[in-house]
Structures are given as C-alpha cells and as structure tokens.
Image (cartoon, rainbow, N blue to C red):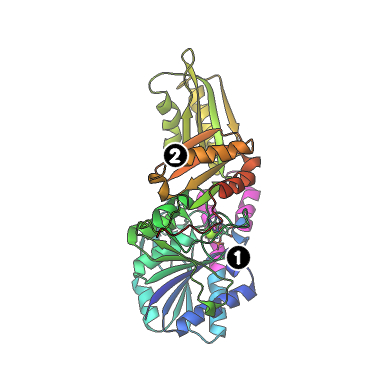
Amino acid sequence: MALIVQKYGGSSVGTIERIQNVARRVAHHHSQGNQVVVVVSAMQGETNRLLGLAHGLSKNPDPRELDVIASTGEQVTIGLLSIALQEQGYQAKSYTGGQVRVLTDSAFTKARILNIDRDRIIDDLNSGKIIVVAGFQGNDENGNITTLGRGGSDTSAVALAAALKADECQIYTDVDGVYTTDPRIVSDARRLDTITFEEMLEMASLGSKVLQIRSVEFAGKYKVKLRVLSSLDDPESNAPGTLITFEEKHNVEQEIISGIAFTRDEAKISIMGVEDRPGIAYAILGPVAEANIDVDMIVQNISESGHTDFSFTVNTGEYEKTLAVLERERAAGKYVAREINSDKTICKVSVVGIGMRTHAGVAAKMFRALASEGINIQVISTSEIKISVIIDEKYLELAVRVLHQAFELDQAPAEIS
Ligand code: ADP
Ligand code: ASP
Ligand code: MG
C-alpha cells in the first residue's frame, strides 16, 4: 500500500464536472489500495476574483485581510470535492490549512510553511478515509490565516508529502508534464520524461509557473518524489508525466539546454547619473532589502566623470513600493542622482540546462539567435546552469520561439552509444 499526495490546480477543479472527474481519479487510486491525500486549489479564476474585490476597496489593502479573503477560495473546493467523493461512495473529509495545522510564519500573502501536524491525517487515513486539504494556506502561531504566494498549492502538496513521508507527490494540472517551454507559447514544445531537480528549480525560479519554486525547494530538501501529470487524461491511461529526478544525468543524453523559461512579472528601475563612490550600491539597495523587496538582476555601468547609471529589476508587484523607497532615500540625501527611470514593459527570458557546465558557446548561440530577429538585450545575467536576458516585452513570444528552435528543443536528444 502506498501513500500518495495528489494536487489538483485551479483549472482541474474549475467546474462541477471537473471536480467530479477529479473525484473519479482520486477514487481510482484509492481503490487500487493506496492511501490518498488530495490538495486542491481554488476553482479557476476564483483567487483573482477574490483579490479583485479587495482591490476594489483599497489601492493598498491590508495583507492580513487579503489572506482572510483569498484563502476562502480553497475552502469552497475542499468541501465540493469531499461531497463529490461521498456521492461516489467514498468516505472523504476536508480540512482547511489551519485545521491540519499547517503552521507558517506571519509573512501575509507570501508565508512560508514551518511545520505540519501529521497525526490527525494519519489517523483518518488509517480509518480508510480520503483526506482533502485546502492548498495555499496555513495559520501562523497566533492563529492568523496566512497564504503562501500565488501558485502556493503546489507547495502545500509537497510539504504535506514531506511531512507524511508519502511515496509520491503528484501534481495534476492542465498539461501532461513539464515541457521544454510553455506549450501555450511554442506549439512544438516537447514533454520531458524527467528533469533534474536543479533544472526544475531554475525553471520555476525563472518563471515557469507549472510548479511554484518553493514546492521544488521542499522536494529537494526532503527528497520528495515529485511528478507532474495531466488531470485531463483518462485515469486508466497511466501516462507517466514528468518525474523530477535527483540524480545527475549520466551523459546518456546530449541535452545542453533542457528548457526555456520566461516571465513578464519583472520591472526595471534605472537610477541615472548617480555618483560613483564606494557604498553607493548599498545606499540604493540596502533600504530596498530592508523593505523586504527582492531584487533580481543588477547592473552598474562603467562610470564617466565620476557618475554612473545603476539598474535593477524587481517583481512588478513590488515596483511601486520600490520606487517609493528610492524616492524617500533620495529626498533624505542618502544618495544623489539625476533621475530615476522605470520600465514595466520588459520581460526576462532564460535558457536552462545543466549541460552548460560542460559546454561552451551557449551564450553566443543565444545572443546570435536573438540578434537574428533584431531583439535588443538590455541586461544579461548568468549562473552555472542558466543565462537570462531582459528584453522588450513585445518580443517575448518571438524570443522564446527563436531560442526553442536555435537549441533544437523540439527534437528528442540523440543517445550517445
Ligand atoms: P494549476 O492551476 O494546475 O496550478 P498553472 O497554470 O499554475 O496550473 O500551471 C500550469 C501551466 O504552466 C500550464 O498550463 C502552462 O501554460 C504553464 N507552463 C509554463 N511553463 C511550462 C513548462 N515548461 N511546462 C509545462 N507547462 C508550463
Ligand atoms: N489559488 C491560488 C492561486 O491562484 C493557489 C494555487 O492555485 O496554487 O494562486
Ligand atoms: Mg499552479
């Protein structure tokens, strides 16, 4: 008998019929003798709708109250799925995040899971029940409702799988696995049978929303067997999806690049004509960090007559807040600058692959492909297994397609004999 945690995202539970389908799939796994814990998201569009209500009242709503509101979406789905399972003749019981005691820190709207009580779930499973848990939410130590950031149900599922020492965590979504890039952008994107944990971590952190980054981090930390599958396939088809693996590839496959990730959720801020002196980067970015804002890419130009331009990117959600911090510090005389420019019409496109460690020329190939379409690169950053560029947002789809083609990602890699 195996213990499986299954997670179903918003589109998989978007209608009553789809919830009934999910119930059939869960029942199928339960009938095969497995213990099943199901984690569900809010019905498709519901979290946006709920947050929209709050933003209709305030430009800057209290994050604690946002979590009170947003967490209700998942509460509806757990009740509906439990009823659907009961209608199909199974014992099912729903729990909110707080009820299973998903303990988080108090960072409202982006809380981190600290601990999960396993005892109550184990007791219920041992009595033959199917357990349905609300994703995306927990409680802090004072009993406040918290949410885990957009896409956070993935993390709820993997954290539960880790806490329960589950045999597998299955993330069911509207695509049948992890692809070389978002199949909605590139129609000949290819499903990967496996992807290494490190590559998946980079893909997720660079914008592939198929898995929330924290879920991948959890899987790595607790070695959870994690698989991405389609909720729309026939349950009996046994489609394998994509398995996240923890072994290094043994050179069996010649892949240099495994995938292309992208995000529109970044904004660029440039501080022009700033004095070039020791401590200037700290004077600008120190207060930004203190305001709990994550800075992504940073570039400082070569200085001319003692002045330079300093640019960095932040998540678009934190863009207004960042500008306010920068203006405040500038007004207080902490640094002197000619002007502060900002640009939300940018995007970040990244190529990811552990093969880059042993292959030179990936950057040149990437830049050549972008140049061939006249796409200007504004900022570049690299790590051992990824290269990211900031470009004008209007070229996003073109850039992803041209890179997918340049690295021949539509073709399965040749085996080395
Ligand atoms: P869910 O509601 O099930 O959590 P998401 O919308 O969060 O689903 O994630 C699934 C979506 O991720 C897919 O529909 C696809 O458009 C997108 N996606 C982005 N990059 C990839 C990729 N490399 N492979 C597969 N899907 C991807
Ligand atoms: N419902 C939440 C969201 O839309 C969490 C999730 O779907 O994973 O972000
Ligand atoms: Mg998701």
Q: Which mark is residue 11?
A: 1
Q: What crowding class fits label 1: few (fewer than 14 Cα within 10 Å), some (14-19), or many (20 or more)?
A: some
Foreground pick, 111 / 177: 177
- Residue 75 drawn in magenta: yes
Q: Nearer the viewer, mark 2 or mark 1?
A: 2
Q: Main secondary structure of the magenta part?
A: helix
Foreground pick, 105 / 246: 246
The boundaries of the magenta stretch are: 49-76
Asked which quadrant contains residue 118, the reply is: bottom left
- In the image, farthest residue toward the front: 417
Residue 201 lies left or right of residue 165; in this view the side is: right
The amino acid type found where label 2 is placed reads Thr
Cβ at disc 1 under 8 Å from ligand 1: yes
Can you give x and y, in whole percent of width and height, for residue 237 in the image? 54, 77
Can the viewer see residue 316?
A: no
- In the image, farthest residue toward the bottom: 89
Q: Which residue is mark 2?
A: 382
The amino acid type found where label 1 is placed reads Ser
Q: Secondary structure at mark 2?
A: strand
Mark closest to the chain's N terminus, 2 or 1 = 1
- Residue 233 drawn in magenta: no
Can you give x and y, in whole percent of width and height, for residue 297 in the image? 48, 36
Q: Give the residue at x 58% y 65%.
A: 174
Cα separation between marks 2 and 1: 34 Å
Question: In which quadrant is the N terminus drawn?
Answer: bottom left
Residue 285 lies left or right of residue 223; in this view the side is: right
Q: Secondary structure at mark 1?
A: helix
Q: Give the residue at x 48% y 53%.
A: 258
